[in-house]
Image (spheres, coloured by chain):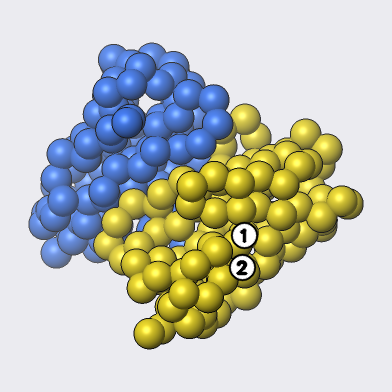
Amino acid sequence: DAKTTQPPSMDCAEGRAANLPCNHSTISGNEYVYWYRQIHSQGPQYIIHGLKNNETNEMASLIITEDRKSSTLILPHATLRDTAVYYCIVEYNTDKLIFGTGTRLQVFP
Amino acid sequence: DVKVTQSSRYLVKRTGEKVFLECVQDMDHENMFWYRQDPGLGLRLIYFSYDVKMKEKGDIPEGYSVSREKKERFSLILESASTNQTSMYLCASSLARGYTFGSGTRLTVV
């Protein structure tokens, strides 16, 4: 079973920041948090991952709480092309990722 | 960029047929994976491989087998296709952290 809990759906206005939460209260000390997204009819796309510290790349920012029991993926300026299903995953075993059902993000004009 | 190529985007097969789904990656990744994706169930891991000739069962291996004769190629085999194997099949590869997925094969078994 997936070790994360995400809301099934969220809406965001275009140009606004999209903040996608994820709970992973049973995370172990050496487990990473990964985020992927899947645009309709395509394979999932890697976004970002982190262990303890906050991370930022060209796509998004990842904020991990100090106790590591939850995290938030931030898309700073959402566009219509960011409409997708977003998966938060805790690495279960080395390179064996277990996907949950994710959050369906709808960006509207 | 790493590229993961799945041989077919759409496939229609008859019940009882032997079906091969092919996946090739071009970045010398050691780890390769097969998932299936169904509405409401998300992605479920079928089989994975950490090296040539090695294979490990995922969460739903029943009705499937795999082959990894070369590092770049990981094949999923449906020995006798059934209608409940109609699904989107996704292949992925990775080296250390972060997967790269193919575009998927939508298989319909009639």
Q: In front here: B83 or A68?
A: A68
Q: In front here: B72 or A103?
A: A103
Is A73 left or right of B107, judged from the image as shown?
A: right
Q: Pointer 2: what residue?
A: A20
- In this rendering, does residue A101 appear at all? no
Q: Position of residue A91 (x, y in %)?
A: 65, 41
Q: Position of residue B29 (x, y in %)?
A: 40, 21
Q: In front here: B22 or A87?
A: A87
Amino acid type at circle 1 is Leu
Amino acid type at circle 2 is Leu
Q: Position of residue A50 (x, y in %)?
A: 67, 42
Mark 1 and mark 2 residues within 8 Å of each other at the beta carbon: yes
Considering the numbered disc 2 on the image, is that residue within a helix, a strand or a loop? strand
- For image coordinates 41% across by 83% down, the residue present is A108
Query: Looking at the colours in the rendered structure, which chain would you say is drawn in blue?
Result: B
- Mark 1 and mark 2 on one chain: yes
Query: Looking at the colours in the rendered structure, which chain would you say is drawn in yellow?
Result: A
Q: Position of residue A32 (x, y in %)?
A: 69, 40
Is A38 left or right of B13, judged from the image as shown?
A: right
Toward which corner of the image does residue B71 lie, by quadrant?
top left
Relative vertical location of residue A58 with respect to residue A107 in this rendering, above or below: above
- For image coordinates 62% across by 75% down, the residue present is A7
Q: Chain of mark 2?
A: A
Q: Pointer 1: what residue?
A: A73
